[in-house]
Image (tube, rainbow, N blue to C red):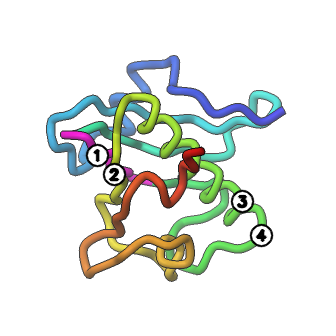
Amino acid sequence: MIEILPMEDREKERSLLEGLPLSGGEARVLLMKDKGEPLGHAAVELWEGTLRILKLEAAGWDGSQKPQGEQIFILDTLMRSAASYGETFGAGKIETAFPDFFSFFQARGFETDDAHAFGPMSLIVKYE
């Protein structure tokens, strides 16, 4: 069973956040596991009504090549879980702290520039 939750090990979480471009908001690492085995994580920060995705990582993907198969599933699921997390805490916008990679975010409706991808939370979280 897949689960995605904020990391319980706060020391390891701090080490994963170290060196990332924090703005000063509440930062957490959402860890994706399947049957207890880590599949990937999303480092996120809530800052002034925006969920900032600081980093996305999937097992077996180093970012140098276009993600494939399960890597796409992991990255997409982490991005959507991060959006849900941000929306829960009142974020109305979502952006990355890094440039789009292989048009991953653009394919999901985000606007992009040389520095990041961005858009309203409604791109990912559907409101009825």
Magenta stretch, main secondary structure class: strand
State the CA–CA distance, disc 3 to disc 4: 7 Å
The local crowd at label 4, few if under 14, some if 14 to 19, many if 20 or more residues have their Cα within 10 Å, is: few
Question: Residue 53 location in percent, x, y?
Answer: 38, 51
| Residue ID at (58%, 50%) | 126
For marks 1 and 4, the one nearer the N-term is: 1
For marks 3 and 1, the one nearer the N-term is: 1
Contact, mark 2 vs mark 1 (Cβ under 8 Å):
yes
Per the image, the residue denoted by label 4 is: 69
Task: Residue 16: say if magenta.
Answer: no
- The image quadrant of residue 116 is bottom left
For marks 2 and 1, the one nearer the N-term is: 1
| Residue ID at (58%, 28%) | 5
- Answer above or below: position of 61 versus 124: below
Q: Report the front residue among 41 and 48.
A: 48
- Answer above or below: position of 110 versus 17: below
The local crowd at label 3, few if under 14, some if 14 to 19, many if 20 or more residues have their Cα within 10 Å, is: few
Q: Which numbered mark, 2 or 3, is in the foreground of this view?
A: 2
The local crowd at label 1, few if under 14, some if 14 to 19, many if 20 or more residues have their Cα within 10 Å, is: many
State the CA–CA distance, disc 2 to disc 1: 5 Å
Task: Residue 52: say if magenta.
Answer: yes
Per the image, the residue denoted by label 3 is: 73
Q: Which numbered mark, 2 or 4, is in the foreground of this view?
A: 2
Left or right side of 64 for 89:
left
What is the residue that sits farthest to the left in this orientation? Answer: 24
Per the image, the residue denoted by label 2 is: 93
| Type of amino acid at the residue the image marks with label 1 | Thr
Q: Which numbered mark, 1 or 4, is in the foreground of this view?
A: 1
Residue 50: image tag = 1
Q: Which numbered mark, 3 or 1, is in the foreground of this view?
A: 1
